[in-house]
Structure formats: structure tokens, C-alpha cells
Image (tube, rainbow, N blue to C red):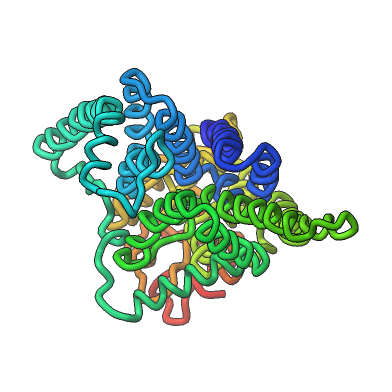
Amino acid sequence: TPVAMFSMIGAAATFTFTRMLFSRAAALTAVIVLAVFPFMIFHERMALTDPLTASIVMLSLWYSLVLAKHPSKRGGLILGVMLSFMIAAKILSVPLLAMPVAVMALLGQKPFQLNRNWRQQIIDLWKLYGPTLLQAGLVVGVIWGVIMGFYFIHGILRPEESRPLVDDYLYGLPDSDTVLDGNMTHVEEAFRYLWGPLLTALCFAGMGVLAWKRWREAALLVGCILAVWLPLIFVAQRPNSRYLSVVGHLWVILAVGGMFILKDELSRLFKAKPLKFLAWTPVGLLGLWVITFGAPFTYQNIYEPTALKLPERETHGYFRNFTGFALRDALQLVETLPPISEGTDQRVVVGIIRSCPFLHYHMVEDAPIKIICPPEREVRHEVLNAALAQYGAVYMFNEELPPPRTDLVLHKERIAGRVQWLATYHRPHGGIIVDVYIVYPGQIPVSGVRTTPDDEAMPLVK
């Protein structure tokens, strides 16, 4: 998939960037840590756009450093394309448009000096990098000018189909301290479950070491992280860890770069040969984390994902709630049952579930199943009745949403038929239940019908 391909490109960019800043050994270590970094690999396995964005961020950061050493107009055009793709992959990466400027100012041919005349330094930097940055800005402006033009035209011509560029739940200014506390708790859980205590300590220790010995690199890496993280923590209503992972590679570089700089300092301190090996202790701690935390998590992520310990939002979002768990079981059950509908040898399934349009992703291409989805939840009864009129008996999937949600509840008096319960499947960690039914046309008495205690609605709580 594109995500898998870009993950490898992101790893390659991480290697090259780390080698340019530190050493080949540090670069190799960074790639090893990245390969088992739960914060990245968990989302990469789900083929989400956030790891793809993270790879483009890393690619853009590396190429910005290349241009900082060798500026060129042609390079500016290429950088502009990279930045345009970065924003297209994830709009929350917009603050990182300032990244090339920071790289050139901090790590370029004429690094910015805090104790010199700022105005003259800015003029000198502009003379050196202005043409490159202008080319990059021009490309981004043209590409996104065209995109936004089509977006606004589409919004005028078809307002009912237009969507906001940024969902309001993501950038909606938390209206209480409770929301901010929840965001901070989520970040703390991400460090605990997706970094582990040891890597968390090494990241912040690396940040301190770099601030002490290589403040420019520290300022660049920390600045890029904060440009994404601070808006998500202080502005977003309920950010997910995957949004934070857009700059996940930079945490790895902070930890690895800091530990290798510390190793070099300890080597100078332990001059006696018998003590030389002690200088490798910081790097050895990275290896210890790989063996005791990163590798075991990676194994579980591949073979036992439901056993993973994750932040609460991830557990709810990727296991309990809007997931393929239980749906795959329901589809496999129906495939083993005989066709019951008239005029077709396929198993006709009416999906009264939130992810009905995506059910085909959980089926083999030639599965003998026909899926019917209500276009809107408000017409779920009408769509079911139309299927009964056309096909006779049909299978039906129904999700049991927790109260006070009632938008998937089916009322018996509005169904032109009778229902027979077949099976119930549970999502992991006490997640939302999926029921499988047969629905027969007409008021035919059917044994085994399950109803709620008041006999007014279904699905039923078992």
C-alpha cells in the first residue's frame, strides 16, 4: 500500500537526516528504534494517513537540510511539491510550512547567531536562501490556490456535499478545563503505553543533552514537535494519538541523537581503556528498550492486537467502537448459511450499522453476499421494507449503540415482517455489539424471535 511504501521512505529519510546531523551509527540506531516504535507502527499497520504524513514531514525536513547546505531554485520547486503533499496528506501539518526556514536559519551555511545583529543576519539569510524559499512558496501557493478554488466552487454549486477542511471536533477550542485535562491525560497515556517509561526518559534526556551541547538541533526538533502538538493539546476537542504521530520520527531522533552525543561526552570523561565501555551505556539503554518494550509490542501488534495495552481513546476508537471486529464474524457466518432471498443465489444483507458502506472491505472479492445500505439512518425502516418487498427474506446486521443513542434502533411496528435472531458478536474490551438476524416478509410467526422487555424495539440487550 502507499502507506507501507511511504513508511519505508520515511525511515530512509530518518536515516539520512540523522546521519547528516550526527553519525552513521546514530542513523542506524534511529532506524532500528523507529522499526519497533509503537507510536508509529501501531498506526502504520492500520494504513492511516497520519504515518504517511509523518514520512512526508521527514522527507521535507531532510530535503530542507540539503537545501540549507546547497540552496537552489530547482531544489525550491521540489521542496514546494513536498510541502504541498504534506498539507494534502494532513491539514494539521500546516504549521510545519515554517520548517524549511527554521532549518536554513539554524543549520545552514550561515547559522543564526543570537549574540550578533539580528537585522543584518536576517538580510544575509534572505540573500542566500530567499530565491529557494520563494520558489517553494510559489509552488505551494499555486497548487493550493487551485485546490482551494475547486473547493469553494464545489461548495457553491453543491453545498450539500461540501465538507469543512478541518472538522470542528479537531479544532474547536476546548470549552472547559475538563477537555484540556483530558487531552493532557491522553498525552501522558501515549507516553506510558506507546513510548514506555524508558524511551520517554531517554527522549527527554536526549532533549536536555542536545540543548546543552547542540542547541540548534534541539531547537529545530523540539520546535517542529511543538508546532504540531501544542495546537492539538490546547485547541483540539479530542485529539487522537495518530494526530500526534505526524512528528513521531523527530522524537526518535531526539532520543538517539542525544544518547550518542552523551556517549561522546562520556568517552572523553572515561579515558582509561577499562572504563571505555561505560561510555556506551546511553546507547545500550536504547537497545534495552528495543528488546524489552519495542520488540514485544511489535509482536503483539502483529499477532495479538486485542491484547495490546493502549491509551483509552485508542482502545475505544480502534477496538470497541467503529471497527471491523464483530463485522467480520457476522459476514463469515452469513457466508456459511444458505441463500434465503428470492431471485438471487447471493446472501442479501441489509446493514443497519454505521460502517455499512465499508463492509465490502471485510469480504473476499467474490464473496456470495449482496450488501444493502440505507443512505441515511432516518430511512433505515424504509430500506429494510423495500428489501423485503424485492427479495423476500433477508439477513440483517444491527449494532447496539449505547444509550442515549437511538439512531440505529429498529421499531417492530415499522417493519413489514418478523425478525429471527441468529447470533451476537462482541467487539473487544466490552465494545459495541453486532447482532445478526433473518427478517421474513409479512407477519409470519417465527420461533426464536428475540425482543426487548417492552416488546417495542430491537435490537435486544442479551
Nearest the eye: 76 or 103: 103
- In the displayed structure, 310 sits above or below 300; it is below
Does residue 26 appear to the left or right of 117 in the view shown?
right
**Residue 295 location, x and y as percent?**
74, 53
Query: Which quarter of the rendered picture does the N terminus lie within?
Result: top right
State the image quarter where residue 458 is shown.
bottom left
- In the displayed structure, 55 sits above or below 139; it is below
Query: Which quarter of the rendered picture does the C terminus lie within?
Result: bottom right
Does residue 108 appear to the left or right of 250 in the view shown?
left
**Residue 20 location, x and y as percent?**
56, 36
**Residue furthest out toward the right:** 274
Name which residue lies at 28% across and 60% down.
171
Name which residue lies at 47% across and 75% down.
185
- In the displayed structure, 355 sits above or below 120; it is below
Nearest the eye: 459 or 124: 124
Nearest the eye: 441 or 407: 407
Name which residue lies at 34% across and 53% down.
114
State the image quarter where residue 251 is shown.
bottom right
Does residue 4 appear to the left or right of 230 in the view shown?
right
**Residue furthest out toward the top:** 74
Name which residue lies at 63% across and 62% down.
202
Nearest the eye: 219 or 75: 219
**Residue 395 location, x and y as percent?**
51, 50
State the image quarter where residue 442 is shown.
bottom left
Residue 417 in view of the camera = yes
